[in-house]
Structures are given as C-alpha cells and as structure tokens.
Image (cartoon, rainbow, N blue to C red):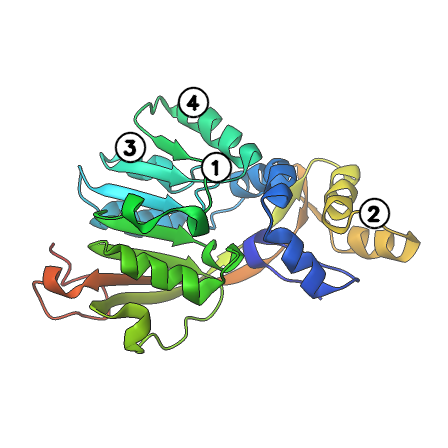
Amino acid sequence: MKVSFRGFFYFGGDMKTLLDKAATVQYWDGNAKWHKLWVEHNNYHDEIIRTLTSFVKPGWRVLDIGAGNGILSLPLSAVGCNVTALEPSCGMRELLRQEATARGIASLQIEARRWEDMPLSEVMDYDLIVASNSLHLTETGFMSALKKIFLAGPRHAFIISEKQFPDFSAEDVCCGYTRFFEEQYGTESSYAYHCIDDALEHWSFKHDRRPDHSERLYIMSGLIYENGHLWRKGNAIVGMCWWTRNNTVKNKPLRGMEAFNV
C-alpha cells in the first residue's frame, strides 16, 4: 500500500500509528531533511503558487497555517503580501529561514505556535488565511481547524488538501462565506534519493526501525533510476478551495476565478 499524502509512503505496520506520528511536531522536526528533498524534486506546488500569486494583491495580510519551508509564504512575500508563517516545527522553521535568506526576503514574520494554540484575537483581520495540507494534522482535526479559520473572519480563505472536501454547506462551519472557487488537479508527488541508503534511512525514520529483509527488497523494487537520482514515483490528486466572506463578494461566484475582483 502506498499513500501519497505530502509524499508519505508506507509498507507494513499500523497505518493509523504512522499517520498519528505524522501529526506531531517532533515528526516534522525529523522529517525536515526529507521534506526539503521532496519539494526540490517535484512540481507539486506549482499550480497552487500560480493560483495564489495570480489573485492576491500587494499589501494583503496573509496567514499561512503550517507554512513548512515557506513553499507558499515566500512567493506570497515576493509579490508584496505581508505574510505571517505559522510553523510549530523548529526543523521546518530552520528550512524556512534558510529559504528566506537565500531569496533575500526579510519581511516574513514567523510564528512558532500551533494553529490550535493561537487565540482568535491574534488571528483576526487577515485578508487571506491559507492552509496547505495542514489542517488534518491539527490536534482538533480538519473540520474544527477549518471552522476556526472562518471564526477568525478573514476576507478570504484558501485551503489545499489531498483529502476530498466535504459539503461545507452547514452554516455552523462556514457561516457568512461563499465557496468561490474549487478545483482539483493531478500532480507528481515523487521522492528523489541520492542513493539506496537514503531511501532505507527515510523508511527507517518513518517506522522507527530498520526494514527487515523483505521490506528492503520491497523498498528497492519500488525505486527507479532517472536523471541522476533514484526515484520512488508517486502521484496525488490535490484539491484547492477558495472561500470569500459574503460582504466582500462584488460579483456572482463562478466555477473559476473569473469573478474575482476584490
């Protein structure tokens, strides 16, 4: 069995235990090395970045929940948004700082607390709150984390997830908001390794043990050599959903972003 969620691959063991582990800050501290390798070798976020940078405006206040290495925060900062990157993992924050320095971006604000620990009074009045594959990792769960976004009252909310979006018509979840834009796209979600030992080390990190003989054979059989790297190929279906607060909508919502003019 293979799960492509944020590049997560699996073989053997308890799936729930592995996913629970991936929801901890400590996991992302240790996973920073592998996350960096993942984002550097696929185009998973290209469509997300294109959408965001096409429709945000310079000067917008943006909160990025689970900012990781800044894959969304930094492009938003580069187009003139005032971004606060919410990232509780020190390993991921270090990657973010390195990326910001490399791009010459000094305006980014970094917040180390978790979304569930942020008081509503500190997250009000944003033009946009964005969360990419992070709400399901919160202690309170996807729906509660999403509801908190709407309670914070941003002008816009943009959620990216590989999980299928449920019907958010219930007023207790998104009261006062219109689902303005929704799209799914397929993308590559592959890992690139420099050697077989890297692949084995990555598997060992996820499972807290070295693979046995049959697991080693499985891992090695799933690798292909291409463009100077060993690859564990994977694909994902990514969903993007944009909500706009009702009193900011100037035109009738369309399937795409053609009506976006606020």
Q: Amino acid at mark 1?
A: Asn
Labelled pair 3, 2 in contact (Cβ < 8 Å): no
The residue beneath circle 4 is 102
The residue beneath circle 3 is 78
Question: Nearer the N terminus, badge 3 or badge 4?
Answer: 3
Labelled pair 4, 2 in contact (Cβ < 8 Å): no
Question: Nearer the N terminus, badge 3 or badge 2?
Answer: 3
**Compared with residue 237, is residue 33 higher up or lower down, i.e. above or below?**
above
- Local secondary structure at mark 1: loop
Where is residue 212 shown, x and y percent of the image? 90, 52
Q: Is residue 143 left or right of residue 128?
A: right
For the residues marked 3 and 2, what is the alpha-carbon distance in whole angstroms?
Answer: 41 Å
Q: Is residue 227 visible in the rendered structure shown here? A: no
Where is residue 219 shown, x and y percent of the image? 79, 53
- Local secondary structure at mark 3: helix
**Compared with residue 75, is residue 259 higher up or lower down, i.e. above or below?**
below
Q: Which mark, by number, is residue 69?
A: 1
Q: Amino acid at mark 2?
A: Arg
Q: Amino acid at mark 3?
A: Ala
Labelled pair 2, 1 in contact (Cβ < 8 Å): no
- Badge 3 local density, few (<14 within 10 Å), some, or many (20+)? some
Question: Nearer the N terminus, badge 4 or badge 2?
Answer: 4
- Give whichever of 162, 190 is nearer the camera: 162
Question: Nearer the N terminus, badge 4 or badge 1?
Answer: 1
Question: Nearer the N terminus, badge 3 or badge 1?
Answer: 1
- Give whichever of 227, 252 is nearer the camera: 252
Depth-wise, is mark 3 or mark 1 nearer the camera? Answer: 1
The residue beneath circle 2 is 209
Q: Amino acid at mark 4?
A: Ala
In what quadrant of the picture does the N terminus appear?
bottom right
Q: Is residue 19 visible in the rendered structure shown here? A: yes
